[in-house]
Amino acid sequence: MFSSKEEFKKTFTDRIESKGTEKSLELAHEILWEMTNDWIQESWKRTNQLYEENHEKQLYYISIEFLIGRVLGQNLINLNFYNLVKEGLDELGIELSEIEELEIEPGLGNGGLGRLAACFMDSLASLELPGHGYGLRYRGGLFTQHFVNGNQTEQPTNWIKDKNNVDTRREDLAVDIPYYGEVQLVMGLDGMRTKIENPEWVKAVPYDIPIVGANGGTVNTLRLWQAEVSNRSSSVGKEYAVYERETAHITDRLYPDDSLETGKILRLKQQYLLCSASLQNIISNHKSSLEKLPESIAIQINDTHPALAVPELMRILIDDFSWDWERAWDVTTRTISYTNHTILEEAMEKWDSHLIQSLLPRIFLIIEEIDRRFKESLQNQGKDDETLRKLSIIEDGVIKMAVLAVVGSYRVNGVAKLHTEILKKREMKELNEQFPNKFHNKTNGITHRRWLIKANQELSGLVTEAIGSQWMKEPERLSELHYFSQNQSFLQNFQEIKSLKKEQLIHHLQRDQNIIVDPSSIFDIHIKRFHGYKRQLMNILHIQMLYDRIKRDSTYRPYPRTFFFGGKAAPSYHFAKQVIKMINTVATKVNNDPLARQHLHIVFVENYNVTQAEYLIPAADVSEQISTASKEASGTGNMKFMMNGALTIGTFDGANVEIFEQVGQENAFVFGMRAEQVMDYEKNHSYNPKEIIESDVEIEKLMEELVKGDWTEGKANADFIVGQLLHEGDPYFVLKDLQSYAKAHEKILDAYENPIKWAEMGVENIAASGIFSSDRTIQQYSDDVWHLTKVPSIY
Ligand SMILES: *Cc1c(COP(=O)(O)O)cnc(C)c1O
């Protein structure tokens, strides 16, 4: 693109002039985008050529979400052009960060699962591995969140613009997807074939996003499908306008509200479109014999949303290529592998048989046959009825997608050691016994190129000054920072950078939400999706306890803390929305109290997304990772904070366990029940929150205030929260862990009194964080599951 700053400036200004329009930040953005893209296109073409010539094994990662965040700045970082461009623009009087602010991030994910997929894409390309993504192009993405009277409101995120879009339409690769219709046997040249008669066809059109790896050499592809009307659909049994509208809806939003039947159908349509379009595309790209499929490609399904890939691949091999069942099953189950992301009962995907039967009749027959054959083999092995029931794919008219995914895959992984153990020993015990070598662990990771090199360029620079730049290629070398945790000038620099990142966050919040924050306060940050098990409720109840104590005890004047919250609630998740409302109500009360305000400040950051995370995480002193033990499969937010030198207050849950193991419990604030205890309580139904309330005066008082409505606006909100804690039996053990949590917070205040020691602990966290780079995760997947070969970019 350009080998020097002067060359960049010249090309940039030439291009601006040639547009002949008025100069503006928007124009600067457009030009910089074009210039970056020109460069990427070349590498992209070269990478694709290399893959074709070398016939290397390709990985396809299918995921219903890809939460990629803003693209321009990250591409400049990975191309190693960021600093050159920044300085060049500076000299032209333009701020690169202002240009970056113009980009609306595509909200193609809800949270951790989608962000993981995005981190994996970055690591695959950076490790020069041939791995690509398949996803959906939701026009309105995940909703944009605003608060009105403290309540969440939801608007579509309009991330698709007229020009400079991140993706390129590939009309030439469009495929048709059949819904509904009747399954019929027809006579073909090579015997009987199954065919779907009179389906409703929908066209899936791919849009490609280049995934630029470190140093810009390898550029892989993220391919997103968009639903459109098909010209084969002349015979649809409904009015054309209805068909048109329904088709446009399919990729309109991420996770349409599935509490309604129409929402469910829409979601199933999304899942099938993703699987069918991706597999049709994979198979048509596959040039050699299909017998060799497992040697030349690997398909990873991210959670069960793409589990229909199993019957769809079977359908293609049997119906389109006239294979017999055994051969098709052998190839399918050596091609697909599956990642499990949750053990929460309500999140285990299940579909009504009738729904699948009517929308996807052929797929339903294949699932039935998979189930029948599997059950038959189990019966032949003499399994008892209870085991048979647990292992069945179809049970009482319901299709269990997790079982389908396990049976149809050659490897199945959990996403942190604890989670994998729970899967193997409890949730999927019978499946693990049936397939003893299938289950394995791959602890999640995050790309240090976004979460440290890009989000915290200042800290990244300091690290490089101390230990050289090799850690960027080999993040586990961050461990060399250990020697600097005793180096006073390093610690001081670290503290200064933390203050700078706080100032940048403050500036951002002031601009975005007109909120003023005290930069000298402790930044205590709890950002993630709103969910019962993530226990935002426990955090806010603790703040209420602190408030009460400040009011009651004139000797209690704790060091000022700012408690940040951020996160969205699923539109149909009533409880999560009530907690959001309550936090906003408590915030108004605490923030407007002249005495409490000197010690406590609550900030609820609107519309939490990747961009907000990039501002918040580098500024954090304290990372809140307080899920009910056993419920958080891994968590990845926890890793991002650690890598930025924040200290974790957390339970023994998900990847927290491994974080504590790496950094040492003396460099974290661990509290609360263990997973075993929680699961025992659940099994025996032996937890009674009333006992806690009766035996603890502080909690008793808190509950009385809640009942009186001191902390809520309107009776409905109070009733709901109290109802959850008392009448619903406090399912996430909030009251049970509350005092242990409060004690951990007291330890935080004690530790913060010694700023040098605090900084030392922060540096130990960074030093121990390298193993949580997704480069490590991807290398492990490649070694143990995909068996990919590096394709060095010739560039
Ligand atoms: C990392 C990330 C998440 C996942 O956070 P957890 O704390 O692991 O739940 C969710 N949303 C965004 C925007 C993220 O960047």
Image (tube, rainbow, N blue to C red):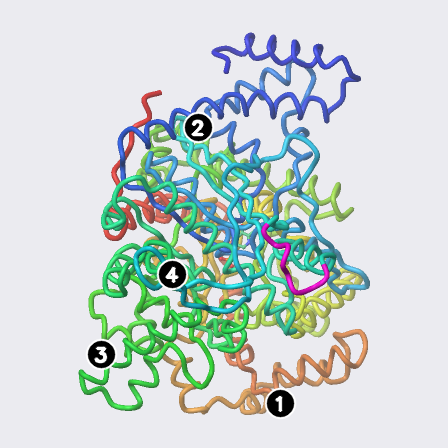
Q: Could you tell whether 507 is left or right of 767 in the image?
A: right
**Residue plotted at (37% across, 42% down):** 131
How many angstroms separate mark 4 from mark 1 (CA)?
49 Å
Q: Is residue 481 above or below residue 66?
A: above
- On the image, the x and y values in percent for residue 304 come to 43, 64
Callout 3 amino acid: Ser
Q: Which residue is mark 4?
A: 315
Q: Nearer the viewer, mark 2 or mark 1?
A: 2
Q: Are circles 1 and 3 on residues that touch, CB within 8 Å? A: no
Callout 1 amino acid: His
Figure quadrant of residue 411: bottom left
Q: Which residue is mark 3?
A: 377
Q: Are circles 4 and 1 on residues that touch, CB within 8 Å? A: no
Could you classify mark 2 by the number of other residues whose Cα lies within 10 Å: few (under 14), some (14-19), or many (20 or more)? Answer: many
How many angstroms separate mark 4 from mark 3 (CA)?
22 Å
Q: Could you tell whether 684 is left or right of 82 in the image?
A: left
Among the two numbered marks 4 and 1 on one chain, the one whose residue lies closer to the N terminus: 4
How many angstroms separate mark 1 from mark 3 (CA)?
45 Å
Specify whether residue 606 is in view: no
Q: Which residue is mark 2?
A: 44
Q: Nearer the viewer, mark 4 or mark 1?
A: 4
Residue 554 versus residue 154: which sits nearer the camera?
Answer: 154
Could you classify mark 4 by the number of other residues whose Cα lies within 10 Å: few (under 14), some (14-19), or many (20 or more)? Answer: many
Among the two numbered marks 2 and 4 on one chain, the one whose residue lies closer to the N terminus: 2
Residue 621 versus residue 676: which sits nearer the camera?
Answer: 676
How many angstroms separate mark 2 from mark 4 (CA)?
32 Å
Q: Which residues are magenta?
A: 232-239
Q: Which residue is mark 1?
A: 727
